[in-house]
Image (cartoon, rainbow, N blue to C red):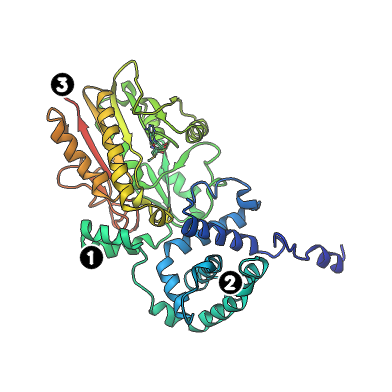
Amino acid sequence: MNAQHVRRRQKPDQRTGRSIPGLPARSHAADLVFGVLNNGKALDGAFESQKAGGLHAGADRALTHALVLTTLRRLPTLDAAINACLDRPLHTSAAKAMAILRVMTAQLLVMEMADHAAVTLAVEDAARRKDTGKLKGLINAVGRRMVREKQALMDATPVSDLPAWLENRWRRTYGQKRTAKIAQAMQQQPAIDLSFKPGVDHQLWLERLSDRDPVSLNERSIRLVKPGGIDRLPGYEEGDWWVQDIAATLPAHSLIDALPNPSQTCVLDLCAAPGGKTAQLASAGCTVTAIDQSAPRMKRLAANMKRLGLTVEVQIADALTYSPKKRFDAVLLDAPCSATGTLRRNPDIGYLRRERDIQSLAKLQASLLEKAAHFVKPNGVLVFATCSLEPEEGEAQITRFLREHQDWSLDPIEADLGPKGVIQDDGTVRTLPHLSADQNGVCPGMDGFFVARLRAPN
Ligand SMILES: C[S@@+](CC[C@H](N)C(=O)[O-])C[C@H]1O[C@@H](n2cnc3c(N)ncnc32)[C@H](O)[C@@H]1O
């Protein structure tokens, strides 16, 4: 193929822009950011399908993912920098242009990507859209100024990037100092934690995963400090491990810890999909019934169990109307919640959820907890968990339940079960995003979870 031929074939497609490397990922990222902030559209599943948004290549998809999450994690910082470069804030009718500016600014100020590519591709993206074409000059001017004044802009930006309603809430619950630490942790891209089946040779896996800077968190979890995809890593196809944040391992782990003989125990996993905790229970030897009301999520659970070589009974059902023929030795209720503890991974939550959602989710959790209690055998175990930092979805649920069920008791979780500082005085677990994931305090960051273990009356 001669050079002229190559040039002709590389002529950009005006409609999709696909032939300019890096443009489709940036353009798609701006659309997704716009979708979250201007249309209230969740990112849920946006990066899962192979052809998400017309992006075929894995590298493009990974770049879109990184651009969107970084933009949303650092939004107040980015907006402050953009506004400092404008004479007056953009009119709301220019929201698409603002999304392009935000994605460009994330590249320039946070991701340390090439200045030239960030600016020229933002200008190109704007030029190709009907609704932003006229603003391409302004985007160019803002981009160039940002490149010149990077350090001064970063020095002048806000310290916290939390959405205001969450920051106010967390200050009330955790105080100013701890909220500042949580805010800092929420700015970071989370590491990837892998859960292994019991009895795994840790040293062997630390060697096999050495390209990704693995750190052993405990005998079941290894953290990959270096970011990247997971489906080409050793052990993925073979089903040797699954991805699960260290904090997310604590609910099932505290349940298994209370069982004298897991292999003779029937466990009901009530809100099970996509199955991280189901995998822990099944690989510990429990006989697991996994139910969830979402058919697509249960499909993922079934695929995950197949990959891991684990057998569980699977039912698509609403836990509120479920009526099993028998009671269980133990029940795990990993309840639907606001998921504010996972803001690092799901920064769209901060812009999509509102105060009133916390109240309605808390009501649903109370009903599910009430129902779950009926499925437990006398003297059996009930573990309640949420990945929320809101006390209404954690501590307050247990206080209310124990007040209304005085024959039930709180079964304190052992102090050495989790990372340092996560077991509260009453034996419940409260993980916070800035805490260290290992006992030595050298591996910062984990999801925010609440876990309580309850014991049924005899
Ligand atoms: C926090 S997620 C569960 C995560 C899961 N335990 C894991 O470790 O992978 C909450 C789940 O609750 C399910 N859910 C919500 N309301 C439900 C209900 N009434 N009955 C059953 N499942 C429900 C959702 O579909 C969602 O999959």
Q: CA distance from mark 2 to mark 3?
A: 65 Å
Q: Is residue 181 left or right of residue 114?
A: left
**Tag of residue 177:** 1
Instruction: Locate residue 123, reporting x and y percent.
Output: 62, 73
Name the residue located 40 percent from the left edge and 61 percent from the top edge: 188
Amino acid bearing label 2: Ala
Crowding at label 3, few (<14), some or many (≥20) Cα neighbours within 10 Å? Answer: few
Q: Secondary structure at mark 3?
A: loop
Q: Quadrant of residue 269?
A: top left
Depth order, front residue of 98/242: 98
Q: Is mark 3 within 8 Å of ligand 1?
A: no
Instruction: Locate residue 345, reporting x and y percent.
Output: 43, 53
Crowding at label 2, few (<14), some or many (≥20) Cα neighbours within 10 Å? Answer: many
Say if 428 sits above or below 214 in the image: above
Q: Secondary structure at mark 2?
A: helix
Q: Is residue 392 left or right of residue 47?
A: left
Q: CA distance from mark 1 to mark 3?
A: 44 Å
Which residue in the protein does label 3 denote? 458
Image quadrant in which the C terminus is located: top left
Depth order, front residue of 199/410: 410
Instruction: Locate residue 431, reporting x and y percent.
Output: 28, 50
Visible in this render: residue 198? no
Which residue in the protein does label 2 denote? 118
Q: Quadrant of residue 321?
A: top left
Q: Quadrant of residue 324?
A: top left
Of the image marks 2 and 1, the number of the one nearer the N terminus = 2
Of the image marks 2 and 3, the number of the one nearer the N terminus = 2
Crowding at label 1, few (<14), some or many (≥20) Cα neighbours within 10 Å? Answer: few
| Ligand 1 lies in quarter | top left
Image quadrant in which the N terminus is located: bottom right
